[in-house]
Amino acid sequence: MAQPLPQRWGDRYNLAGLGAKLDGSASDAVTIQSIYNALPSNSLVEVPRGSRWNGKLAAPDPNKYVTWLFDGPIAGYYPSPGGDGDVNITLNGGFYAGAVSKTSKHFNTPASAFFWNMNPGFCGPFCSNYAQMPAFGAQAISGPTSSGNTSAINAELDSYGNGPSSNYDVGINSFVKKMGQNSVWGIVDDIQDFSAKSPGAFASWNEFDLWANGQDIPEFDPSYGNAQSGHRSLFYISGSHLNAAYWSAHQNVSAWSAGLYDKPDVTRIQVGVNGVAWLWYARTTGTTGSAQPNFPAPTEAVASYDGATTLTVSSVVSGTISIGDYVTAAQPVHPFQIVKQLTGTTGGAGTYQIALDAGIASESAFSSEGVYIAPRVTDGTAVWQFGEMYNQTIGSVLWLTGSLGDGYDTPVGGDSTIRINNAWLDASNSQMSSTASVVRVASGQIAVDFTANGTLAGRNQHTLSYSTGLAYSAGGGVVHRTFDDGIEARPVSITVAAGTTIADAASASGPYVLVKANADNSGVTVSSTLGNTGASQTIMNISAHSIYVYPINSAWAFYGKSVGSGTLLPPYSSVTAINIGTNLLFAEYHPQAP
């Protein structure tokens, strides 16, 4: 195809120079189609300013790739690239890049940004340098005289597809691969308020909206009411282990490499030992042998490392440590080898001398961490290093943190305009380990508030908590308590113990009394209502001090004790006094729960 000399570099063409009038006429569209048919693939075609061509081709070639460079606007709200899989770039008061896929099997991203960091000397967070080095950066400023909404990045996806089972469209997709030992964060959303003023409406806000119509699961659907994610999920979180192949014979495997332009793709395999799947990775590049070698289960231990040559193993949970084994976990970053046991039980708890791999200058010290210890396995010309368990666990899904003195009012809540059809929290589908709990609170914390009404005054009027027993409270006072030994009590009074003799001890009235003491050996006298045979009264010491419980008066005695003398009640324990007749009281003790 003839073209002016200045346009020949890089198969770059000017559409007007190739004979197009660009007047928007039907005949010119035929001319442009003919020009397009003659263009070689990977051409760059410039469309000069003033063009009235709408950018459409009647018969695009899905096997041809053309980049169209428009020096002005393209007619239409959504500018259309000329071919199938082509990219167009528009320079018209800004930069626009677009692409369209019709029948083409290849896809070209309209605009891409790429950055490769191979700088070993850049000092990051340890030098208080938290700035990111991005492949793409966008910054917008909403100035003090501005109005309207300002965004640094805006993404819009219009989805018209009709293949729900085979396709999913994503507004913003973040795909992060962790191949080394850097900390990797998928998304960091950092809002900082420097206004020094109390916040107004929506002052600092992260928002997730889902606007639609109709019920997600219709009430007449057989699955309605079941705990499930449904078809709409405003915040869906998924965590799954990465797949890894099994061992195979005569397989080429790749190990880690650290060259300037390297992108190491380390071979990983899963190996089952005694019903547990473990992950191993290639330590050296090579080819596996004809038969699978023995991959042992790792020794599990708790250890500390001094940052030099000594590993101190405080306990071995399973297995035995052998000389020549390698230690790995979150730390050390690079596995190191055990070369000698210095002290302790052979293969068990004790101190060990270690050696770093060649090329590793140092490893950071660590204290009391769980580590795996296993040998490296030679396999043909390859060597395998033990990695970790194959199945994953995730430490937390939503974790709140902040500076001392800061607070959160309502970590999870809802407006009165919404209706919950199943439950705020539903664990009925989940497998729970023996140490797991759906809800976990500390002693003294209110676990459940039954009658809240959305106001501060309505909080904690009827609650359930645990402190020296499971307690139900109304209006701030305990009305029913169940102790760990099964004793149930309904307190009617709280007594502050006073005095050290029966004459000046505090009086305990009611069938059940909580007693507080401000000092050891304070005293409380049981109620005179115990004068009737068979009557009983329970006294609970809810203080950290010991107290004496005295009989009704100096004419009464506890069984086995002298008349008028008290019986010792240790901290946080209780005693039930029972009238057994002839001025005798029997003391039934309930010690503090372990």
Image: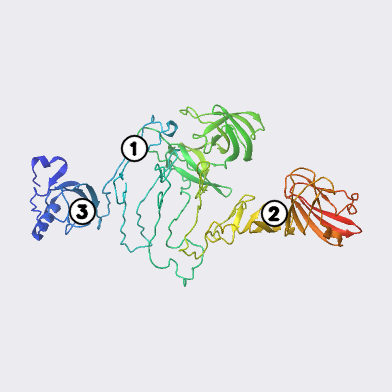
Circle 1 packing at 10 Å, graded few (<14), some (14-19), many (20+), is few
Which residue is found at the position 52% from the left and 36% from the top? 331
Which residue is found at the position 43% from the left and 31% from the top? 127
Q: Which residue is mark 1?
A: 116
The first of marks 3 and 1 along the sequence is: 3
Q: Secondary structure at mark 1?
A: loop
Q: Callout 1, which amino acid?
A: Trp
Q: Callout 2, which amino acid?
A: Gly
Q: CA distance from mark 2 to mark 1?
A: 61 Å
Q: Which residue is mark 2?
A: 469
Residue 330: x and y in percent read 52, 38
Residue 97: x and y in percent read 24, 49
Q: Secondary structure at mark 3?
A: loop
Q: Is residue 186 left or right of residue 308?
A: left
Residue 246 in view of the camera: yes
Which residue is found at the position 38% from the left and 47% from the top? 175
Circle 2 packing at 10 Å, graded few (<14), some (14-19), many (20+), is many
Residue 163: x and y in percent read 35, 63
User: Which mark identifies residue 278?
Assistant: none
Q: Which residue is mark 3?
A: 81
